[in-house]
Amino acid sequence: MVSSRIQEYSYGLVVQCRLRSVSDGHVREGEGGDCPSSNNETPGEHVAGVDNRAAGRLAGDLIGRFLPKDEPQKIALFAGSLAYRGHEEREMGFRHILSEEFRYLEIVDLREIRDDRIRAYAESTTLLSGHPDLAAIYNIGGGNSGIGKPLEECGRGREVVFVGHEVTEDTRLMLIKGTMDALTSPPSFIRF
């Protein structure tokens, strides 16, 4: 899978796959030569990536600070896929900060949207109609525009706190309009 051309012109290779067994196998194929590899799932000396647990904690802290203090509120989570270790870690960090600092906030739903804005739109529309008292949304992965559109369509874009990751043209515009309240760029690390 990893060609000799990649090994010839690269200093390293980082792989993200949903299935650990697939990514481990492909990383092993890349070993050997002058191209070190890591898939962020394989324990070892060479690791590069995002501190996803810290990213989830930051998102939870922001939502907790944006909502009224000590008032019970309902929150929904969206994940691209919990098969992604990074999304699982963000969820853990988010839940951890809520249990530490914001015990009065309740997670009422977790939906997987496969980082797909069309699926995110359908899931968000259903969620918003089923929870008219929803106070906040945390999107762990991609598909932010699919969440923002139904918020705007139902007139709750400035009412529901919406926090996600990654600055894109869509998320930048949602920040300007007030549909999104915060975006984080998760802290990265490299360890050799």
Image: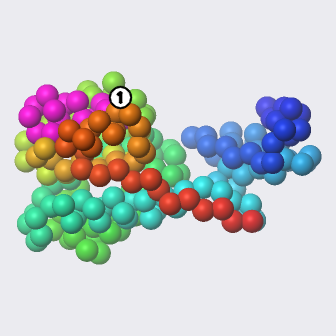
For the stretch drawn in magenta, what is the main secondary structure?
helix
Vertically, is 185 above or below 149? Answer: below
Say which quadrant the N terminus sits in.
top right
Regarding residue 21, the answer to whether it shows in the image is no
Residue at 35% over, 50% down: 183
| Closer to the camera in the image, 32 or 110 | 32
SS at mark 1 in the image:
helix
Instruction: Confirm whether the magenta stretch covers residue 79.
Output: no
Q: Quadrant of residue 18?
A: top right
Q: Which region shows up in magenta?
A: 143-157
Say which quadrant the C terminus sits in.
bottom right
Disc 1: CA contacts within 10 A as few (<14), some (14-19) or many (>=20): some
- List the single residue furthest toward the right: 33
- Whether residue 171 sits left or right of residue 180 in the image: it is right
Residue at 43% over, 59% down: 55
- Whether residue 19 sits left or right of residue 125 in the image: it is right
- Whether residue 136 sits left or right of residue 48 in the image: it is left
Q: Badge 1 is on which residue?
A: 117
- Whether residue 79 sits left or right of residue 124 in the image: it is right
Q: Residue 117, percent across and down?
A: 35, 28
Vertically, is 45 above or below 119? Answer: below
Q: Residue 97, percent across and down?
A: 32, 69
Residue at 23% over, 55% down: 107
Q: Residue 54, percent across and down?
A: 44, 64
- List the single residue furthest toward the front: 176
Kind of residue at disc 1: Arg
